[in-house]
């Protein structure tokens, strides 16, 4: 049975008591640099980890509950993994942007100076920079997909190094590329829809405020009851209202972004569940689909979710380590 990622994840969120208040609180916490992202990762991927184990629970009642004792460590690990994964795309984008800007500036300068040969070379440099910039943006999108898989491995094993096992991440991606690309498409579609809604709201609010300001100004001038100072005060107050409205819209955009992250994290939990997490051993050991070979791999590829999973507490421990691998909670070097 093929799971409907958006519908299932959305149902899990909306059926959680006080879900909208939790989204709003997470958006507020997200205003704090670093700390906010740690909280967001720790909370959402702790919830995603539960469903990957096959344990169906609503959103945790408390944002800072730390019921499994690994909330802060999980959030910190995922922040580090996210930073490292996006480092290379960020460098590529930066190089492309610099080349593009320098090339365009040099092109304009050489055109003004009449140096046609230099102008052609500068234009070519700007074109190459644009291509590098575009490649960096596409690479960033692809790396973000791999980060979702790495984040699930980090959350399940409770080890930072599990997120950097690129070979394991890549094999999981290859095993069900279609499924995770559906999650990516869902993420992209949600982002586009919410961006359009927010843009339309901004345009409508801006037009309303401008028209209201113009109407107030015209009324005062037509009535002859105000001087320039009064008119300026009215326009200034309208600007203050506009500023408050923009702040509210920015916050709404942050709430929307948190909602999308929550849907994606939960969907990734369902996607990871197909890999039979309870049978995972040490992080370096083969996963069940790797051991089973091609024949059993097809069986594991069929999604096991049949409309319901067990209820209860998800195990606090990571998957059982192999005989030659130390307990994850006792390996201080990994922490």
Image (spheres, rainbow, N blue to C red):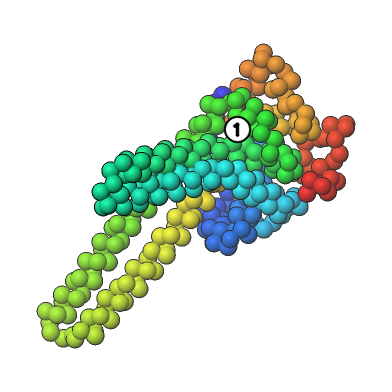
Q: Position of residue 143 (x, y in %)?
A: 56, 38
Q: Position of residue 320 (x, y in %)?
A: 81, 35
Among the 4 quarters of the image, the one containing residue 306: top right
Camera-nearest residue between 326 and 226: 326
Which quarter of the figure is the N terminus placed in?
top right
Find disc 1 in the rendering and name its residue. Answer: 271
Among the 4 quarters of the image, the one containing residue 121: top left
Q: Position of residue 296 (x, y in %)?
A: 68, 16
Q: Is residue 78 above or below residue 290?
A: below
Q: Is residue 101 left or right of residue 174?
A: left
Camera-nearest residue between 103 and 30: 103
Q: Look at 47% across and 51% down and name the residue there.
A: 256
Q: Can residue 234 be seen in the rendering of this structure?
A: yes
Q: Crowding at label 1, few (<14), some or many (≥20) Cα neighbours within 10 Å?
A: many
Q: Is residue 19 above or below residue 247?
A: above
The residue sitting at the right extreme is 323
Which secondary structure, mark 1? helix
Q: Can residue 29 be seen in the rendering of this structure?
A: no
Q: Is residue 215 left or right of residue 69?
A: left
Among the 4 quarters of the image, the one containing residue 157: top right
The tally of labels here is 1
Q: Position of residue 181 (x, y in %)?
A: 51, 31
Q: Look at 68% across and 39% down and name the residue there.
A: 164
Q: Look at 75% across and 43% down and name the residue there.
A: 159
Q: Is residue 29 left or right of residue 193?
A: right
Q: Is residue 254 above or below residue 218?
A: above
Q: Look at 20% across and 70% down and name the residue there.
A: 214
């Amino acid at each position: 049975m093929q799971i409907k990622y958006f519908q299932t994840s959305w149902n899990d969120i909306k059926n959680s008591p006080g879900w909208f208040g939790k989204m709003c609180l997470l958006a507020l916490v997200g205003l704090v640099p670093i700390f906010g992202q740690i909280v967001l990762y720790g909370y959402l991927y702790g919830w995603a980890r539960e469903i990957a184990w096959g344990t169906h629970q609503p959103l945790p009642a408390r944002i800072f509950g730390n019921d499994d004792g690994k909330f802060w460590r999980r959030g910190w690990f995922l922040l580090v993994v996210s930073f490292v994964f996006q480092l290379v795309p960020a460098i590529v984008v930066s190089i492309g942007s610099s080349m593009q800007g320098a090339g365009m500036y040099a092109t304009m300068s050489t055109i003004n100076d009449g140096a046609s040969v230099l102008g052609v070379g500068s234009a070519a440099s700007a074109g190459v920079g644009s291509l590098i910039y575009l490649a960096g943006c596409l690479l960033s999108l692809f790396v973000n997909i791999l980060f979702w898989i790495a984040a699930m491995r980090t959350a399940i094993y409770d080890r930072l190094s599990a997120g950097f096992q690129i070979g394991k991440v890549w094999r999981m991606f290859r095993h069900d590329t279609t499924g995770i690309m559906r999650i990516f498409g869902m993420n992209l579609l949600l982002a586009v829809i919410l961006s359009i809604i927010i843009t339309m709201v901004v345009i409508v609010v801006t037009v309303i405020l401008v028209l209201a300001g113009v109407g107030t100004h015209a009324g005062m001038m037509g009535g002859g009851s105000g001087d320039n100072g009064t008119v300026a005060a009215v326009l200034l107050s309208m600007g203050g209202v506009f500023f408050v409205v923009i702040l509210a819209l920015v916050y709404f955009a942050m709430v929307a972004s948190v909602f999308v992250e929550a849907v994606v994290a939960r969907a990734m939990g369902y996607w990871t569940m197909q890999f039979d997490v309870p049978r995972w051993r040490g992080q370096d050991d083969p996963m069940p689909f790797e051991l089973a070979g091609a024949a059993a791999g097809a069986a594991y590829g069929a999604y096991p979710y049949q409309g319901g999973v067990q209820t209860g507490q998800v195990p606090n421990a990571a998957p059982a380590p192999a005989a030659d691998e130390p307990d994850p909670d006792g390996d201080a070097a990994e922490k």
